[in-house]
Structure formats: C-alpha cells, structure tokens
Amino acid sequence: MISVVVLTKNEEKDLPGCLESVAWSDDIHVFDSISSDRTLEVARSHGAVITQRPFDNWSAHQNWGLRNLPFRHPWVFYIDADERVTPALRDSLFAAAKDPGASVAFRVHRRDFFMDRWLKHVQATSSYIRFFRPAHIRYERLVNPVTIVDGPVSDVDGYLDHFPFSKGLDHWFERHNNYSRLEAQQILRDRAEGAGFSMRKAFFARAPQERRRNQKELFYRMPFRPTLQFIILYVLKRGFLDGRAGYTYARMRSIYEAMIEMKLTEMRRLTVAPANAPEKSA
C-alpha cells in the first residue's frame, strides 16, 4: 500500500535503524548518491531496491527520484537515513493511504533530538510534507528545498524522529558548510532572476511550506541575521526551555547563518572583481 524512499550518501551507520523503522513496507527504495562505504550492502541485506545517481543539488535530485524510481504503490513516504518512523506515525500513514479524502499529500510532524533531548521549542520547524502521491509533488531550491504540492494537503498524527547529530558535531558542521555554500548560491540566483517574496504570505499563508518559502526570502533580506536567528530560536521560540541542548543548538544555527552571510559576501566580491580589476600593462 505504501512505498518508501530513503536518500543516502555514506549512511552505513544510520541506515540500519532507518530501514528497520520502515520494515512494514514491501517496497523500500534506497536512492543513493554513489556511496563509498557499506551503504549498499546494508540496503541489500534489508531487501531494498537500490538506485544510484550522482548528486547535483537537492531539488534536482529529489525531483529526478520522484519521476524515475519504480514505485510499486501510489503513495510514497520519503525519509532520510537519520530519521525513524514511530509506530504511531506508521499507523497514521496506513490510515491516510486507505482513506485520503481529497488530499494528495500529508504533513508529518518531526522531533529533532540533540544531547539526548527532544528540541521541542528551539526546532526551527517541525512540519514537513513527506507522504504523498509523487505526481503531485515537486521541489524547488538548491538546498533546504521547498515542497510544492499540486492539490490539497492534510496532516497525520504520530512523530518522525530525527537524529541529526548521530555522526557527531564534526559531521554536522561539514554538512552545513556545504549547505551554506548552496544557500548563498540560491540567494544570488533568486536576486539575479528577480525573485521576490510576499509579506502577506510570509505570515498568513495557510500552507506551512508556503509560509516557510516566503519567510526564507524575507529573512535573507534582513540585517544581522546570525544574531537575529539566535534571538528567534532561543528567545521568541523559547529555546531556553530545552536547556543546554537548546542553547547550544541555537548558537550553532546562528553560526550557520554567519557562514551563509560570509560566503554570500565572498561570492559577490568574486563576481564583481573581474569586471573591476585593473588592466595589466603590456
């Protein structure tokens, strides 16, 4: 009744737990970005269908997967290797697939964990569209993609548990070093193409993903973003209630925003510099 797709790149550590949490599906696809560790061996041992494709950017990669993977069922659940489906969520997915009504996609509520604690308050967002009919879904943006849905969206009960620090802080910073580069490229691309945002949609759009997309565009135009990010997560979202984990996570997200800001400045300078460079004498 439900197909599952897992995106992987060197996920031999996290993949076993992920696949065990979706063992209820008879159609599990591991969509791999040319792993060099034991990821494929783990996938085969769990009976998963393996498809490999070199990674280019998030939206292009995900869109290719939705259009080309041979899903057996009309409903697909998308999960990352460091995530786990809880029993309550599993039951809700089956109920939704059996009686979806007019909905073509469903939002899933995710719990992020850090330092053995659920980041209940400091988590930037907890609602993600992960359960859908592939023909009605597409992704936009190079990184942290926005999900565009052609049709009604509803919510399902239960949690998707996320362990983004399962490989340690070094891995988190390495990954976000790459994310920050892609975010800076996305900002430059949007501004070159004249992409704007709607203040009204940023705060009042009914769909969380639509609000998120416009809030991102608004946020990237605001000064002092790293400090503002910390204030939003730790103070306004009451991240202080998550204890030391909340404080540390809010600081890390602030550092991530600073990385984006610095790389954006560097990219602008490198783009303008050749045009303004002095001519060499003969």
Image (cartoon, helix red, strand yellow):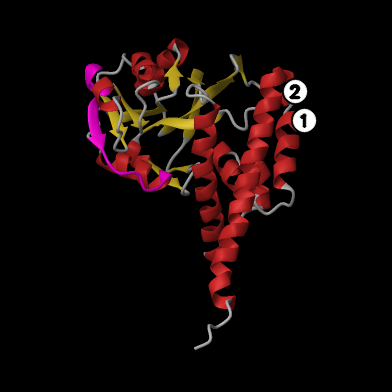
Residue pushed farthest top? 87
**Residue name at image x 43 percent, y 17 percent:** 85
For the record, the magenta segment spans 43-58
Amino acid residing under circle 2: Phe
Q: Which residue position holds label 1?
A: 235
Give the vertical position of 196 relative to 107 (above or below): below
- Hey, which quadrant is residue 15 in on the image? top left
**Residue 82 lies in the magenta stretch:** no
Q: Position of residue 176 (x, y in %)?
A: 53, 39
For residue 239, side relative to residue 124 (left or right)? right
SS of the residue at dot 2?
A: helix
Disc 1 and disc 2 in contact, CB within 8 angstroms: yes
**Residue name at image x 50 percent, y 21 percent:** 163
Q: Position of residue 78 (x, y in %)?
A: 38, 29
Amino acid residing under circle 1: Val
Q: Which residue position holds label 2?
A: 240
